[in-house]
Amino acid sequence: MTAIVWKPRELPTHGQTTLPRRYFTDPALLAEEEEKLFRRQWLCVDREEKVARPGDYFLLEVAGESIIILRDQQGTVRAFYNVCRHRGSRICEEHQGQFSETIQCPYHAWTYGLDGRLIGAPATHDLEGFRKADWPLKAVPLALWEGFIFINLAENPASFEETHAPLLGRFTRFAMPSLRLGKTIEYDIRANWKLIVQNYSECYHCPLVHPTLTKRTPPSLGENDLTDGPYLGGYMVLAEDARSMTLTGRVCGVPVSATLPEEDHDRVYYYSIMPNMLLSLHPDYVMFHVLWPVAVDRTRVFCSWLFHPATLADPAFDIEDGTRFWDMTNREDWHVCELSQQGVTSRSYTPGPYSRRESVSAAFDRDYIRAMEHPAQVIFPNLAG
């Protein structure tokens, strides 16, 4: 098979087509994605502030696993499989809450510290060779970045710093660790998760689908700066009469950072972070989406907005001006994604050519095909074998 050389910063859409039908309709493909993507790559989970205090925890269901995310007594954020080391019982049932100083299995009362150590195991004192130190909760690799929690279900994954090197320090000027959650909306979308990422990655559809968004950021103004690999995107320029992506066009809060460069007050940045995070950076707030495939034709999406603490403390600011704008825009997107899902299920569907205005969507497909270890002919059907 002829190798393809992927060169960064190019727009190599010539000859590239959209993905074949089975990538959006075959449950076996979703199972393969769970194994090769959602069990091997770093997944965005939520914000650190969700476990703000020692003992705070929440559960995450991903790729058939239940994971406990918590903050221990020393303030360290940790992740463990929600599985007792004795008989394998689920330990936690409540989706979110607070531990005191221990975690106890409801079946046989095996008890663990918040650092995962087994500290209590009734009727095991006379077991030959039994040592509590040998039976801690199984930890899940965890990384913190810009106030976000990431986990990786692989046994020995490459470090987050290694895999996410292109992102380290890139967004420091937005001071995201100091921002606070203003609102979250959950959406249940009847579409394959890849259709959602592909839609987010292009504004070819904006003039027809998003008339209000198009007024705020004309699709012709902007540039992509990450154009190859698992992290993709760039910026769009605000229209002269718009100061933010809000219903009124006015800012809905103070700048996210007092040192935000002047040029960033006139831009909105959009990045997809493979496989399940969409990050949108505005001058007065940051929005992020976290995607969780539920079925081959269904995706649960959590959309959240982060603001400077001074914005949330000042009733003069209306954060709903921004959140309502994006709730409207999200629903416009979800509608066309669901139309796409309905269409690709048809036997008449065949992959179509990508336009140059969809270069980032095409780049997403290339990285996806690489990660899935599928042949390049899937998206370059004319490539010689």
Image (cartoon, rainbow, N blue to C red):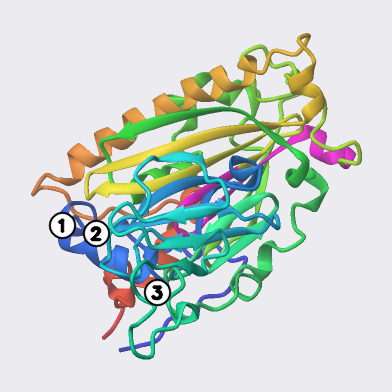
**In front: label 1 or label 2:** 2
Residue 254 on image: x %, y %: 82, 25
Q: Read off the residue under disc 1.
A: 26
Left or right, 149 with respect to 80, comes to right
Q: Is residue 207 above or below residue 257?
A: above
Measure the C-alpha gap from mark 1 to mark 3: 19 Å
Point 72% across, 19% down: residue: 252
Q: Is residue 335 above or below residue 204?
A: above
Residue 292 on image: x %, y %: 37, 48
Structural crowding at the residue carrying mark 3, measured as other residues with C-alpha within 10 Å and reported as few (<14), some (14–19) or many (≥20): some
Structural crowding at the residue carrying mark 1, measured as other residues with C-alpha within 10 Å and reported as few (<14), some (14–19) or many (≥20): some
Q: Is residue 32 above or below residue 202?
A: below
Identify the magenta region.
261-279
Question: In this orientation, which residue lies closer to the viewer: 161 or 82?
Answer: 82
Point 59% across, 72% down: residue: 163
Q: Read off the residue under disc 3.
A: 370
Measure the C-alpha gap from mark 2 to mark 3: 16 Å
Residue 38 on image: x %, y %: 38, 63
In the rendered structure, which disc, 1 or 3, sits on the residue that comes first in sequence? 1
Q: Which mark is residue 30?
A: 2
Point 25% across, 36% down: residue: 190
State yes or no: discs 1 and 2 in contact (Cβ < 8 Å): yes
Q: Amino acid at mark 1?
A: Asp
Q: Amino acid at mark 3?
A: Arg
Which image quadrant is residue 189 in? top left
Q: Amino acid at mark 2?
A: Leu
In the rendered structure, which disc, 2 or 3, sits on the residue that comes first in sequence? 2
Which secondary structure lies at badge 1? loop
**In front: label 2 or label 3:** 2
